[in-house]
Image (cartoon, rainbow, N blue to C red):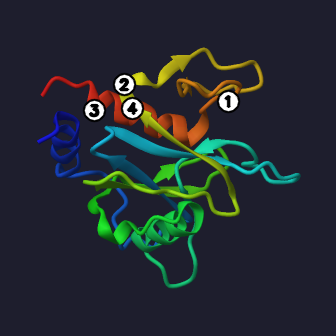
Amino acid sequence: MDPILARILEMVLKPLEGGGCGSPEYDASVAVIYEEPSRSIILIERVERPGDPWSGHIAFPGGFRKPGEDSYETAVREAWEEIHIDLRRAFHLGDIGIWLTRGSVRVVPHIFVSKEVLDAKPGEEVSRILKAVISEIEEIECPQNISRAPCFRVPGVEGKVIWGLTARIIEWLMRHERSEW
């Protein structure tokens, strides 16, 4: 088994605080998709739109819940809408609890593993799809306009900084990917 996948499985299968697929106390979900053949996670660059607070940001596919959905269903629906991937075919490792954004949005990240290379295609809210090997994502000093660390850059993607909740999730992934088990 791939060592990164083994580490993620071991960590996710441990009891976690908060969250849960059925938790009604969330506002949005994101899909953290690990593509085993390429050893990459899938990120998106959002389309730039006036008035959109997430305009042009690098993020995980995801978004706000719809009435009647649980956080898993939100993550699966948003991945389909944003990158045209059916995550019901991927292995769902579970969620990693409820994370709070700076704007007090309660987000549940769900971790998925695909045993195949995924043919992701940008939806209308996505300008491009990025695949990045976790160990190649570079931690950088945050620009002056971003007051909260950590900040990261994906190799080959100039002029874009990963920050906020996406950066915190990536930091969490790096901490577990690099841990000695």
Q: Secondary structure at mark 3?
A: helix
The residue carrying mark 3 is 176
Q: Secondary structure at mark 1?
A: loop
What is the spatial separation of the Cα atoms under label 2 and label 3, in whole angstroms? Answer: 11 Å
The residue carrying mark 4 is 133
Q: Residue at x 49, y 70 (%)?
A: 74
Relative to 66, 144 lies left or right:
right
Q: Nearer the viewer, mark 3 or mark 4?
A: 4
Residue 101 vertical placement versus 176 (above, below): below
Q: Residue at x 30, y 63 (%)?
A: 90
Residue 162 x/y as whole percent:
60, 33
Q: Secondary structure at mark 2?
A: helix
The mark nearer the N terminus, 3 or 4, is: 4
The residue carrying mark 2 is 135
The residue carrying mark 1 is 160
Residue 2 x/y as whole percent:
16, 38
Q: Secondary structure at mark 4?
A: strand
The mark nearer the N terminus, 3 or 1, is: 1
The mark nearer the N terminus, 2 or 1, is: 2
The mark nearer the N terminus, 1 or 4, is: 4
Q: Residues within 10 Å of mark 1 (few under 14, many from 20)?
A: some
What is the spatial separation of the Cα atoms under label 3 and label 1, in whole angstroms? Answer: 24 Å
What is the spatial separation of the Cα atoms under label 2 and label 1, in whole angstroms? Answer: 18 Å
Q: Residue at x 27, y 24 (%)?
A: 178
